[in-house]
Amino acid sequence: MALGTGGDAIQAVYVIAVLNSVVLAGVLWRHRDRPGAAPLLANVLAAAVWTGTGLALMRLESGPLARALFALMFLGIGFATMTLLVFTLEYTGRERFTRPTILAALSIEPLLAALFVVVNPDALFYTLHEGVVEWGPAFWIHTAYSYTVLAVATGLIGEFLYRSRSLYRGQSAALLAGTVAAWVANGVYTLGPIEVDTTPIGFIATGALYAIAIVRYRLTDVVPIARDRVLDSVTDGVFVVDDDNRLIDANPVARSLLADVDGSPIGATVDSLLADWPALCEEFRTLTAAGEPAERELEVDGEHYLVKTTPIEDGRDRHVGWLFVVRDITERKRREAELQRQNDRLERFADLVSHDLRNPLNVADGYLDLAREADDNAAYLDEIERSHERMETIIEDVLALAREGADVTEPEPVALADIAERAWNGVETGAASIAIDADVTILADPERTTRLLENLFRNSLEHGAQRADGAGLEITVGTLGDARDGSVAGFYVADDGSGIPSSRRDRVFEGGYTTDEDGTGFGLAIVAEIATAHDWTGTVTESDTGGARFEFRGVEPAAGAISSDADSESDASAGVTESSQP
């Protein structure tokens, strides 16, 4: 290396290299909070120091300033090498090796190199004859160390490129090419016959390739997440088994499931790991026999697990092993068992109400008929009959409460207008009328939806006072639309009666709550149970005319069955079906 020399072309290359590093550093500074951006920024700045001091040394032959710049240049060289390794470790998911103690250890060599340049004991690092530098043994030790670090970094990026896919391949390929460009350019000058330092040319190529990785492949926006970090975060147990049925990987949750296994499970065969559970060995063979993804629920020592199996293939579509994902579903199974026990108790209760109460009620009705024949005091007998009818109503409502709450697992396409018409015809409506503007087909249980509407109609008829002009009550059934796309979000039932005071609206769906001394308080509770079984959300508010309005949201429309002109409210002037019963 010659100090104080360098033609205009060479100096221009150095200037371009410095500017290139500065611009790239500015881009990285804006993304400095992203994983891996900080060490890459430090690497680019160190390269700028390297080329910048090299440019300055072209104008100096000797003296204290030249010696200081020479030391600063090797400080930049050392930290450029070190930060490249740190960035590579973070980028490839090995950030556990970038602890402060390791970083401090990696910083020792650049500092020692700079110190040797300044002190240069016994010309160990270099000798200077008429502006020409001749390298000593310390320099070659430094060079060997630097190239070793570069080789490790290059190998890590190359390995990541080999096993990565899609977007990350573009990133890692650009990074690998940029790293090799700088390395080769420096090696040609350091180890080859070329007297002109070609390192800045390599830095220009490196900067261009790093810019491609950042701009084209979004290096600072989309940073790969290490596989082991992902697996360590998974709450399910993940096992990887090779084609020889040996366990070759397991995440922490999976290892905890093998806590009773002596020694390290990695490398052991599945048969040896499951030697104490022959039934599990048989399940393993069953899951892997078909060679296709499969899943099964297994019980082991009172614990329940869902096991999903997926075959693993290499880049040439050759089968190389199996991925097992094991989820602990013990708590879910316990909840299901408890729910089943509750449903069984509820069903037994319903049978008890149906049988043990209805039988004596039927007997009482029979004696009532006999009493009518033998006694002409009809007033008392009519009161008894009304009591019997009320008991029958209570029994029907209790049975409905017990049975309507079961989840709707197989909903059918239901035309809401048709079901509303059927429900209206199923109640005593008197002089009331109905307006139906619900041209939509929804997924629901038709029988339970009919009961829901019947109960809402009865509630309006029983609690909605007549209007001041003496006309009958009017009830409206319409759809609730989603203004964003015109789809149906639910439906409503409204009336023009006296309405429900706001202080009582939170309680209307409670079982047994009623303001009518002759009511059971179960009608709207049954409505709530049916809505919940469909996973609908029911609310009560005030209608446009001051009456009661019940809204049901979360209703799923049948595919392709939504009316194209559905809107957020019913339009009384378009598509309204009116009916009444005398």
Image (cartoon, rainbow, N blue to C red):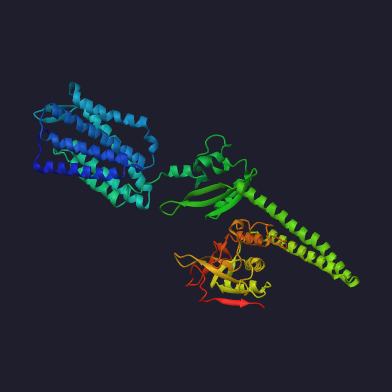
- Total marks shown come to 0
User: Is residue 267 found left or right of 61 in the rendered image?
Assistant: right
The spot of residue 480 in percent (x, y) is 52, 66
Note whether 330 is above or below 419 in the view shown: above
**Residue at 41% of width from left, 52% of height from top?**
315
Name of the residue lying farthest toward the bottom: 582
Displayed quadrant of residue 97: top left
The spot of residue 393 in percent (x, y) is 74, 64
User: Is residue 532 found left or right of 246 in the rendered image?
Assistant: right
Quadrant (top left, top right, bottom left, bottom right) of the C terminus: bottom right
The spot of residue 251 in percent (x, y) is 49, 42
Displayed quadrant of residue 551: bottom right
**Residue at 33% of width from left, 32% of height from top?**
103
* Closer-to-camera residue (329/416): 416
The spot of residue 78 in percent (x, y) is 25, 33
Note whether 504 is above or below 266 in the view shown: below
Residue 151, visible in the rendered structure: no
Quadrant (top left, top right, bottom left, bottom right) of the N terminus: top left
Residue 491, visible in the rendered structure: yes
User: Is residue 434 found left or right of 100 in the rendered image?
Assistant: right
